[in-house]
Amino acid sequence: MTATSPAWLANPTDVSEAKKKLDQHTFETVQWHFHESTGSPFWLGKKAELGFDPLKEIKTFDDLKKFPMFEDEWLRGGPVERWIPKGLAGKPTYVFETGGTTGIPKSRVVIDDFRIDYELFSHTLPDQYFPKGANWLMLGPSGPRRLRLAVEHLCQYRGGICFCIDLDPRWVIKLIKKGWMEHLEEYKKHCIDQAITILTANHNIKCMFATPKLLESLAMGLAEKGTTLRECGITGIFSGGTEFTPQWTRFCVEELLEGLPEQSGVYMTPTYGNTLMGLACSRPITDEDNYTIAYYAPEPRAVVEIVDFKDSNKIVPYGQTGRVKLYTMTKEFFVPGFLERDEGERELPYSKYPWDGVSGVRPYHGFASSTTVGVY
Amino acid sequence: MLTIQPLRWGKPYNSLDTFDVIHFDTGEAIAKIGQVTGGMVQLDMRKADQARKALRKFSCEDLIQKCQKAAQLFEHEPLSVGDGIQTVSDFIHQQSASTGLPEHMCQSNMKKNCFVLSNMAKILDCLTRGLPLDVYTRGYGEENRGVTVSYQCQAPVLGAVLPNNSPGVHTLWLPAVPLQVGLVLKPGSQEPWTPYRMISAFIAAGIPAEAFCLYPGGHDVGSTIMSKCERSMIFGSAQTVQQYSGNPRVQAHGPGFSKILIGDDIVDRWEDYLDMMVESVASNSGRGCINCSGIWASRHTKKIAEAIAAKIGPMEALPPQDPNAQLAAFTNKQMATGTWSMIQQDLAESGVTDMTASYGPRLVEKERCAYLRPMVLHADSPSRGVASKEYMFPFVSVVECPQKDMIKSIGQTLIGTALTADPSWIDDLTNAVNIDRLNIGAIATNRLNWLQPHEGNLTEFLFRNRAYQFAG
């Protein structure tokens, strides 16, 4: 949380406009998902259990509190087609998974959302550091995950070609749970070796996605070969994961990337996201702001609230700690409030994103000891 | 409140991540400790050679003198620690407050560290068996019998993952400095005090700051130190020792399972040795690997156990400032209750008797911490599970075992004190590979002669003895 009236604070008019836009978007999204002609079998089926008519009673974003909390357990198992809105039937559909180290993973069907989310994100990237036409390296989870295709699309949208490596996070989690730390190290090395090979093979790669842990390992691997990310030509890094602490970010910027962008020529943007919500961007990181990382959801398509640990409909005051609550409102997917596995502090609206943000994201303390996070 | 930051090759690093060191009894924060990550350690270790280079600008003899000066500063003078100045009494209060050790024990540990620093010349003479120290600086030299010898340094720095609750172990890494080997230390989260004060004393005594790293942090910091330092030591459980067994890069220190073995020629006079046995069990609140956890004899074992119980059973949990306090608190209450449960299982076996049962309850639970009052258990046979147990408080099992079976039954023993004058048995004990440090006669297990190369000779760990020839 930053002191009152920081330079980046959004002006009240923009905040109010954004709120109107959000209310309008909420109304239209609910109309779509609960109308017999366009809604998905899942939400049309749930409508009967709600005890109210969403088509009539949901007019603003705040009205969404009438819905029960979304349970991600609903996403496990089939038929996955029940999530496809009738209005989008017949379109080529992807299924992306999350979890699944043991048991049935959670699935989300996607038609165009990942492309839309990452195109919107693309417009937030500074061209100076993420040059159009540059090739990318995707150093993150692959397989049935949205991220691999999304990053590839981001790269293509910006006119480049994306090089990828295979990374199976389920196997990584199993290695940790089994205590096979030597295997874990070897697997990490296997991934990093591939990334170094690609980076040093004259492919004009200037941008990349990496999780913080892999970014660190890659920088270390390059250091052992006497080079750096900057020397390999990287100028823009898009990274994501809950292990993004201010201290880690400072270490990354100052020591792995050799300074803030204006000094090193390398720009790193932390993001926060998941398969359910999409991608939240961060305010630019500065040393004056003690490397605070504050995320802002891509409203109105998704919203992040910081709510009281005991009352998920009560937003905490600015600067206070609470649980992260997500909303997703696209034509493909509707989540009217879901309690994430994370907690953080509520942040003031930012000029570019005039709505609430969240900083200090970390695993929710109630789960922290039983959750394996930041494994790859 | 004191804020203490990591030290990276002598330079303080203002970490944005901090960890509060908490008073074990009041829960009050005593200090904020900045944290590093494994990545930072990994990056720093690429410059480890600079630490030895900085130390090699001074001769070993110069560094020994500086160690003597550092000892004096450590024991008597205010020193800069973190963003404050720490007096000797601050140090003792702080260490006691976070580790649960009574203050007079903190003072004793301080003196022990100072003794080693002050006597570094003699200790190195013993560790090196009298070799001229420039052999270690240059890598080769001539022995006093006129033969060329070579000792090649295997690591520019010694890494150490230090324990939380045993301020006495720091003597083990101190001799690295005068041998011109830098230090990369991960202080225990509850005991940052000794490493920080010691490094501050070294620097104030004129030893180059760039020879030192102090890395408070999480598990990843420890594992990075272990993997990136060519030589490191770690303090942990029996499992930790097992994990690093046979690894020439790691010296693992765990439970000692130190014992007193009473020979048949002496056992009828066991009462003469009672005070020595009590000291071995209860000194320093029984926390060390050098405390005695087993007393073995062929007869009179019940009487021996009764007599020890009568001496230590009545010990009460007293406030740490009390000069009569003999027991350290378990700052983690669950550790005390877990230990207590394990002892209940030990006692459930037939042939095992609690000789301290009549001295009142052993487990004393307080709001934030707990104490275990001393326990003496009698085992009628070496096959009882308790015969091979060691716990972190004054705890001993007195085991009945024929002398002829003792050596093969005691298991691994860090310090074995044998009360005997029987030459044949002394010969057997001398040849027993499961006894690390052997005392013949009435020497309490906790009384180490620092002038004897001991557990894990540091020169042998840090240097490799190899052939070296000159033509002609």
Image (spheres, coloured by chain):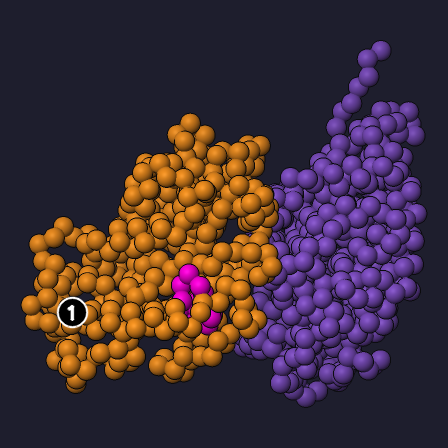
Q: Position of residue B299 (x, y in %)?
A: 72, 70
* Protein chain holding label 1: A
Q: Which chain is depicted purple? A: B
Q: Which residues are magenta?
A: A346-359
Q: Report the amino acid beneath label 1.
A: His
Q: Is residue B155 left or right of residue A167?
A: right
Q: Is residue B283 left or right of residue B117?
A: left
Rendered-image quadrant of the C terminus of chain B: top right
The majority secondary structure of the magenta stretch comes to loop
> Vertical placement of A228 versus A33: above or below?
above
Q: Say if residue A149 shows up in the picture.
A: yes
Q: Residue at left 68%, top 43%?
A: B231
Q: Residue furthest top?
A: B472
Q: Say if residue B427 shows up in the picture.
A: no
Q: Residue at left 19%, top 82%?
A: A57
- Tell me the SS state at disc 1: helix
Give the labeled residue for mark 1: A33
Quarter occupied by residue B406: bottom right
> Vertical placement of A282 versus A264: above or below?
below
Q: Residue at left 75%, top 41%?
A: B51
Q: Position of residue B9 (x, y in %)?
A: 73, 47
Q: Residue at left 91%, top 42%?
A: B62
Rendered-image quadrant of the N terminus of chain B: bottom right
> Vertical placement of B360 versus A189: above or below?
below
Q: Which chain is depicted orange? A: A
In this rendered view, identify the residue nearer to me: B471 or A140: A140
> Vertical placement of B234 versus B19: above or below?
above
Say whether residue A156 is magenta. no
